Image (cartoon, helix red, strand yellow):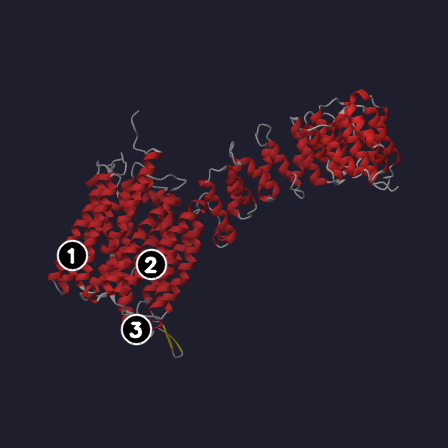
Amino acid sequence: MPKTKYLSEAEKRYGRHLLYWSEIFNGVGFSLLGDTIVYLLAVHFGAGNIALGYISSAIYIAGLILPIAPLIIRGHNMIKVQTVMWVLRGVFCFTYLALFFLQGGLAIAVLLATYTIFCIFRMLGIILNDFTQKSVSSVTNRGRVVANLNVAYQGSSIFVKFLSSLITSVQRFSGLAGLIGLQMFGVFAFIGAAGCIRKIPCRAKVEYQKGRTISVLFKEAMADMDIRMRLLLRWLFLTLTVVLSMSVPFMSTELHLDSSLVILYSVVVGLAVVLAGIISRRFADRLGSRPLIIWSCWLLLVSLACWIFAPPQLGAIAFFIFGFFANFSLWLINILDIRLIASVIPDNEAVSFTSMVNFVIAVFALIAGVISGVLVDLGDSIDGMFVVGSFQFGNDYSFMFIFAFVLAALGLAVAFRFRERGSYSANEAAQVVFSVHGIQAVSMIEKLEHTEDPAKRKALLLALGSNLTGVATSELRAKLASPFSEDKQEVIQALGYRPRQALVDDLIRIATDDDSFVQLDAIAALGAYGKNEKARNALVGLLDGKWSSVRSVASKSLARITEGPEYLDTINLLSMNARHIDEEIDYLIAKRYMDHEGKFYRDFFLSVRQGRSATFRQTRYAVLASFLHFGSPRLAKLFELMNNGDVSDFLTDFLTEARDISDIDEHYNEIFAAFGAEDWRKVRDICLGMAYTADVSYDHRFENLRQGILAAASMDLSLFDVQDALAELYFCYSLKKNSKT
């Protein structure tokens, strides 16, 4: 069978593995060839603020070439094109070696030109990388995949930046030679990344339809409310990323830190991005992007306010902290934006669409880069822009950070207007992210996804059932909606142990479905929802259910809710038709709750008259004994001994202990002999003697039980056997022991 351009699950897994490794190499390469070291080289050669602003935006300005990109690469395999671009952007960086022989303006020109071409090749690869991420992921795991790729990238980047900081802290490598030497290692890292990308499965080719220009795609995207909001978020916050990247030269020009500390700041930024990836990986697919973006915007605004008002005298540590929180919140938004955009990339026009997206980013980045440089120059010319008394607030970059603050505020406004299907509200998300119980719920859900052991799964589901957060409720509701799941029964039982009113409608739906394999479990669980009128009404309706087992379980659950005689007559009638012992037990439990006087004990020998089996009668007697709490010995234990031994085994200990009653003491040997000879008449006579003389009128239950036992006097003795004789002996002894006289 011919394969389509879409990958199988096995191919996706293999592709994700290779893509993770490519991101590890990319993290190494870009940390050495990206903006941080380029900033340091620019400062080394005396570049001005406009040039620094250009460097901060060049990574996106390169997108201006994208209108012609689909025409150049159309018809080629996407992965092959992406591989070539990765190789070229690394190899062309050998041009940096020319800086050893240049000075001043010419050196700056070569530096900016090389970096620009590097960014162009990078951009051509990025428009394909977005599709690659989509092709090796699915809707259910895309947020996790994007976050994992980000963590892989930033993890290797942090490691290399930390090493770079150590290397440049050495006097010998702190200058031009050390910086360019590090860049050369980055070249080989990109070649390694290209080797990984080359092996990713891909049957898709770059498609381009004549007339489907960037302007056409832009108009179509803007006409769609959902896509428009996603793109506005992407464009605003990537523009903000350009502006905030100026914090790197800020460390050099405002705080006058040496190269090693500036690179160390980039390590701090990398740690923030890794943390953002971890948060996104854990929560994005479950909560949605929108609520996390909203909360991140608030944190970003607070962080930017610190940048605006903080004076340089505050020290490097303070700005490192501001930078950590600002970049954490910003990159959490960017990672979530990638997830949002990946979901709307068209399969047939992936390159054209991503080219349009990145072209607009390029325009915004160019404007933002120039504005940032101008605003820094303006800040240089104004001394003490925020003065309160003798205190001066702000710095030369304050106007630029005000610009960033405005962009973040606009992004927050768009996030509030954006509607993401299936996502949590901001308040619901906060209850998950900012609470211990919410984090525990997400952790349990993740463990469930990777746990096969039935016992461990049951424990996790019970724990999740006790977690009352919204994310736990959503996960439980999803499992209840499945027509068949190994977890469904455990979930329903958990909802019975720990009622959750938010899911009562889901339980009722299952309880009233005669073809649900967990109908009885759901009916039983409804018994825990005592104050819920919907649950009560559903159970009343189920008293007329299709199956006899449904009627019996509904009776038991309704009794738990009402604990009154309102439906007792109905249940008494239903119980006469109990077919199986589990139904009989359900009805007995229902009567125990509803019949406070214990009139049902008068039917003590009902199972004898019905000709039920030995097992049925034993079980019924044991259940009745458990209701009355007569104490040691338990009747169930006596039946257990009887079923496994002879007369002596099950009677000796009991009769020895029961000799505190004179009736037992006087007939001790006779009882042994009667059981041995199966003389049930003798046993009955001894038992009736105890029942006649027992005075238990103070307790309606005991008195009704006594009347039920006395009914044996008029019954056909041939119906009795050892089960009934032992039960009769046990209950009569217990009544006599609880007698007033």
Find residue 269 and name its label.
2
Foreground disc of the pair 3, 2: 2
- Where residue 505 sits, quadrant-wise, is top right
Outermost residue toward the top?
A: 718
Q: In this view, does 443 lie to the left or right of 540?
A: left
> Which sits earlier in the primary sequence, circle 1 or circle 3?
1
What label does residue 96 carry, if any? 1
Badge 3 amino acid: Ile
* Circles 3 and 2 in contact, beta carbons < 8 Å: no
The residue carrying mark 3 is: 382
Q: Which residue is drawn at 23% across and 63% down?
A: 168
Residue 5, position as x, y percentages in the image: 29, 33
Quadrant placement of the C terminus = top right
Helix, strand or loop under label 1:
helix
Query: 205 or 281: nearer the eye?
Result: 281
Question: From this viewpoint, is residue 503 visible?
Answer: yes
In this view of the protein, which residue sits in the foreground, 234 or 215?
234
Q: Which of marks 3 and 2 is nearer the N terminus?
A: 2
Whether residue 355 is visible to the viewer of this picture, yes or no, is no
How far across and down, in percent of the image, does residue 671 sit? 81, 29
Secondary element type, mark 2: helix
Instruction: Measure the C-alpha gap from mark 3 to mark 2.
Output: 29 Å
Q: Is the residue 215 above or below the residue 45 in the image? A: above
User: Looking at the rendered structure, which numbered label has been put on residue 303?
Assistant: none
Quadrant holding the N terminus: top left
- The kind of residue tagged 2 is Val
The residue furthest left is: 101
Q: In which quarter of the image is residue 668?
A: top right
**706 shown above or below 421:** above
Give the class, few, some or many, for how many residues have Cα within 10 Å of label 1's Cα (few <14, many ≥20).
some
Q: Which of marks 1 and 3 is in front?
A: 1
Please provide percent x and percent y for residue 83.
22, 42
